[in-house]
Image: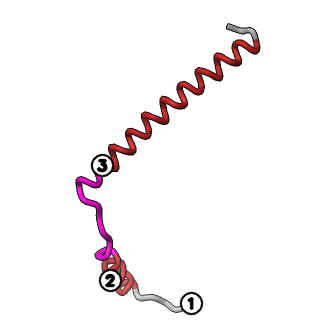
Amino acid sequence: MAKSNPFQFLQDVRSEAAKVTWPSRRETLITTGLVLAMVVVSSLFFLFTDTIIRWGLGIILGAR
């Protein structure tokens, strides 16, 4: 394995980081909003699913 120069490595890292296309503020806010909306939808889904399963097991096991 060839030895690498740490200075060259840092130059390569800076060069690659400069090629990154960062999202705009608007894109970041839209994506964050969509993630939060999906968290709310998922939470409601699992709340209702858990409630239905608990209700069904209560009926089956006779424990209300």
Residue 11's mark? Answer: 2
Query: Residue 61: image x %, image y %?
Result: 76, 13
The kind of residue tagged 1 is: Met
Q: Secondary structure at mark 3?
A: helix
Question: Is residue 5 on the magenta stretch?
Answer: no
What separation in Å lies between label 1 and label 3 (alpha carbons)?
Answer: 45 Å
Please report the residue visible at 44 percent of the width from the left and 38 percent of the height from the top. Answer: 39
Q: Which residue is mark 3?
A: 30
Q: Which mark is residue 1?
A: 1
Q: How many marks?
A: 3
Would you place residue 2 above or below residue 12 in this image? below
N-term mark: 3 or 2: 2
Q: Is residue 54 above or below residue 45?
A: above
Q: Quadrant of residue 34?
A: top left
Camera-side residue of 2 and 54: 54
Mark 2 packing: few (<14 Cα in 10 Å), some, or many (20+)?
A: few
Quadrant the C terminus occupies? top right
User: Tags 3 and 2 in contact by the CB under 8 Å rule?
Assistant: no
Query: Where is residue 58 shown, x and y percent of the image?
Result: 69, 13
Quarter of the picture containing the N terminus is: bottom right
Q: Nearer the viewer, mark 3 or mark 2?
A: 3
Rounded to the nearest whole Å, what is the CA distance between mark 1 and mark 2? 20 Å
Residue 32, given in percent of the width and then of the height, sits at 33, 47
In this view, the mark in front (1 or 3): 3
User: Residue farthest to the left?
Assistant: 25
CA distance for labels 3 and 2: 34 Å
| x 35%, y 80%: residue | 10
Place of residue 26 in the rendered image (x, y in percent of width and height, measured from the top left): 24, 53
Amino acid on which the number 3 mark rests in the picture = Ile
